[in-house]
């Protein structure tokens, strides 16, 4: 296999990963917007802040945080691939 074929395949794989991450991030931001609206509604009515609501908020915050870390790590990987010197 020639170097140009390998480079082209690597570029296609990188482009595919980038598009997949972009789509996932777009979906994630829509979810975050919904969650922000839900949190705003909850704090407007303190009576609905009970143990199940607190548990749900904590769980959701944890899931958002871990997903943000995952997306960030994948972005770092793509950035490193794009900025590595050509061989």
Image (cartoon, rainbow, N blue to C red):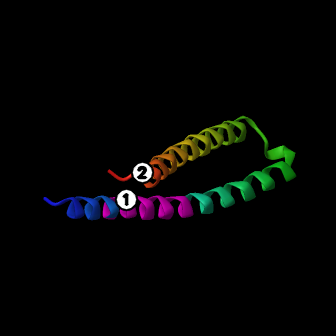
> Is residue 9 or residue 70 the one in the foreground?
9
Give the residues drawn in magenta, as a range.
Answer: 12-27
Lateral position of residue 14 relative to residue 78, left or right: left
> Is residue 22 or residue 76 the one in the foreground?
76
Residue 38 among those drawn in magenta:
no
- The residue singled out by tag 1 in the image is 14
Residue 41 is situated, as x and y percent measured from the top left of the image, at: 79, 56
Mark in front: 2 vs 1 = 2
Residue 13 among those drawn in magenta:
yes
Q: Residue 81 carries which label?
A: 2
For the point 39% across and 64% down, the residue is 15
Q: What element carries label 2?
A: helix
For disc 1, the neighbor class at 10 Å (few under 14, some 14 to 19, many from 20) is some
For the point 49% across and 52% down, the residue is 79
Quadrant of the image occupied by residue 58 = top right
Residue 66 is situated, as x and y percent measured from the top left of the image, at: 56, 40
């Amino acid at each position: 296999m020639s170097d140009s074929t390998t480079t082209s395949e690597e570029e296609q794989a990188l482009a595919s990963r980038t598009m997949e991450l972009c789509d996932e991030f777009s979906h994630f931001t829509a979810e975050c917007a919904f969650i922000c609206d839900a949190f705003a509604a909850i704090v407007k009515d303190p009576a609905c802040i009970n143990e199940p609501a607190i548990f749900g908020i904590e769980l959701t915050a944890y899931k958002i945080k871990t997903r943000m870390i995952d997306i960030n790590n994948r972005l770092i990987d793509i950035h490193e691939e794009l900025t590595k010197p050509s061989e």
